[in-house]
Image (cartoon, rainbow, N blue to C red):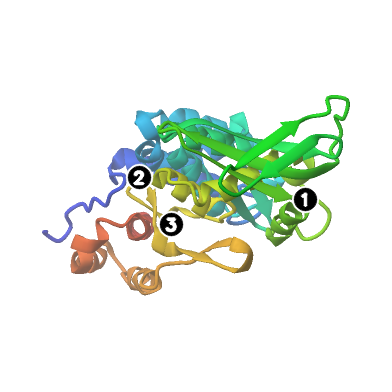
Amino acid sequence: MRAGTTITFQPYKMTTNGNAIAERAKSALAKSTKPGTLAGLNSDAVAAILQPYSLAIANALPNGGKPDRIIQSAVFQITSNPALANCTAKSVIGCVLNSSLLGVNPALKQCFFIPYGDQATFQLSYTGLIALARRSGMVLDVYAEVVRRKDRFEVTYGTDRKIIHVPDLSDTGEDFVAAYAVIKYTNGGTEFLVMTADQIEKRRMKSKTQRGAPSGVWLEWKPEMWKKTALRGLLKTAPLSDEQAAAIATDGATLTPDNFQRGEVKAETLTYEEGEAVEVKEAEDLQSIREGVADCSDLDSLERYWKQGADEWAKRSDVIEIFNARKIELSQ
């Protein structure tokens, strides 16, 4: 490649229009009342910040969905929740990308973007897990229920496994004693999982956003979170698709654009801690690449550095983003 030739790094072309979109995003982010976040920004500014990721969103969406609709929904979620706007922009964008990848809509309460400190965490809802399970094509029916104290509830294990649940319709409170999930497969098989109140409470307390009394979605959507906990436990061992495995792996995670590659979450960037909480870590070589890019003082040196690993780097959205950002800086 000749010196001075325009460099194009995927996932979006750095054309004049691409530069203009990136500049608008950078300008909008600079107006934040809290650096590095979306705090204090109006709808137009938030939309401008998300716009450079429209191609990544389009690539992630199943069945060729429209990224503009996803961006509009995300803008509403962010601007209507000051705590979310105060999270880092990258963690919020990671939530948007992951909801696009899994095809779940926060506007329909299929997932939530949960603020935790200055990080936004992605969390599936009960209805989101149901939607994903049904989408696999292997499921005839899937559901979960909570069991109240006055209900008739019997469980039989062994060679004739079954559940008998007769709800007491006069008891509409939230004094739950258990929850269970059931999957009926298209091939005729059935699986279920029953969890007691103590087991569910233990799972809740292992969440990094839950350390005392129920709060957030656990307080506002208690029945759904109990049912989701049972269903999530069942889906972990159910013979479903890779989509369900990816959904469960990222449930409760803090993700950034660096954790996505070619419309998928890079599994090697996910680590697991006690309580099955998910923490995202950066690829080991990314910091050295970031430092090498920062050392490039002009576009020619940036181009030469890119050529050193172009064959491998062109496949990685995290590296591409670093090169694109540095190109914008050097073009000013």
Q: Nearer the viewer, mark 2 or mark 1?
A: 1
Q: Quadrant of the N terminus?
A: bottom left
Image quadrant in which the C terminus is located = bottom left
- Would residue 81 be seen by someone viewing this image from the given angle? no
In the figure, 127 relative to 316: above or below?
above
Q: Position of residue 275 (x, y in %)?
A: 63, 64
Is residue 7 visible in this depiction of the protein? yes
* Disc 1, SS: helix
Q: Does residue 15 lie above or below 43 as drawn?
A: below
Q: Secondary structure at mark 2?
A: helix
The residue sitting at 69% across, 57% down in the picture is 203
| Residue at mark 3 to residue at mark 1: CA–CA distance | 35 Å
Residue 138 picture location, percent across and down: 41, 35
297 relative to 278 in the view: left or right: left
Q: Residues within 10 Å of mark 1 (few under 14, many from 20)?
A: some
Residue 287 in picture, x, y percent from top left: 40, 72
Q: Which residue is mark 2?
A: 19
Q: CA distance from mark 2 to mark 1?
A: 54 Å
Taking the spot 34% from the left edge, 42% from the top edge, the residue there is 18
